[in-house]
Amino acid sequence: MRSTNQAIDLPLLHEKQVSLALKREDLIHPLVSGNKYRKLKYNLIAATAERVDTILTFGGAYSNHIAATAYAGRLNGFNTIGVIRGEELAEKWKDNQTLKLAHENGMRFKFISRNAYRNKYTEASKKKLDAEFGPFYLLPEGGSNTLAVKGCEEIITEDDIHFDVICSSVGTGGTLAGIINAANQNQRVLGFPSLKGDFLKEDIRNFTAKKNWQLQTDYHFGGYAKVSETLIHFINEFKSHTQIPLDPIYTGKMIYGILDLVKKNYFKPKTKILAIHTGGLQSIKGMNEVLKKKKLPQISI
């Protein structure tokens, strides 16, 4: 399955003589879109080969991975279990659009404290989950493992060889690692983390030995699932100009960062940039519920 590259036409890009195209991975599927499709592809094949009937994974309240795993699991005949960060969500998950969607696609939930979530990969935690749920195929948070990276390597094709810079948002690092592996050595890869901090570098290095990449850590807008009026206005204006929707957790922040770097002359004239739209548009409805409660502007759908 392949996506298309869409040229972005904005006055700033003309002024700075920089070209930008957006790889529309979001158009692969409404729910299993972008990097989620890529990450799940080979993991579902592996789960089928292992003859297990249940997939267990981890995520937060607005996790695209949780929603995509639930849908893909149902489509491929798997039971799915989501271990969700935040015990408080046990009483109000039905008000959360992402978790509601996952449940409608058959996912069972286990809500755990943030402290327990930090220790989710320990042997003791694994034994507890084994005892409670029986045999399952384990998918890490965000779906990032060796098979996920293999799938994400397929995002970049021969059609993308002429780009100088390839940009992607970063959650757990698996998508970026796949893009780095697939990129030519003369192409520069920029990652835009949606989380605070510089800790993702080591996670990415676990999946790639290449060095033609770096992280731009100034565009997280406060951290994962954090947004501001500036970001909301930007996403709405971008859609108005291009007709392309951006999610507020990942791709919206990346595109904001790219254009801010263009404005600051970070890229030389004639630079050709490819940005990856990793999907995740299902999160907009849930984010709008939060924004409504805070009496902030809504994101256009």
Image (cartoon, helix red, strand yellow):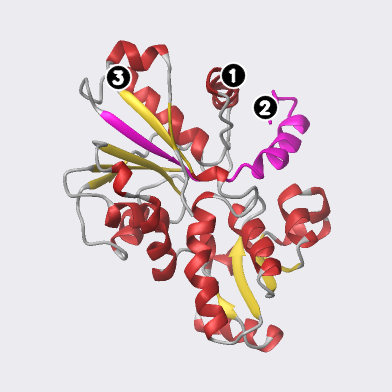
Direction from residue 79 to residue 23 in the image, left or right:
left
Within-10-Å neighbours for mark 3: few <14, some 14–19, many 20+: few
Amino acid type assigned to the residue bearing label 2 in the image: Ser
Q: Kindly identify which numbered label has been placed on residue 240.
A: 1
Q: Kindly identify which numbered label has been placed on residue 50.
A: none
Is 123 placed above or below 209 here?
A: below
Q: Nearer the viewer, residue 284 or 92?
A: 284
Image coords of residue 210 (percent x, y): 21, 57
Of mark 2 and mark 1, the one earlier in the sequence is 1
Q: Is residue 219 visible?
A: no
On the image, numbered disc 2 is attached to which residue?
300
Image coords of residue 224 (percent x, y): 54, 45
On the image, numbered disc 3 is attached to which residue?
264
Of mark 1 and mark 3, the one earlier in the sequence is 1
User: What range of the chain is rendered magenta?
Assistant: 272-301
Q: CA distance from mark 2 to mark 1?
A: 9 Å
Mark 2 and mark 3 in contact? Answer it, CB < 8 Å: no
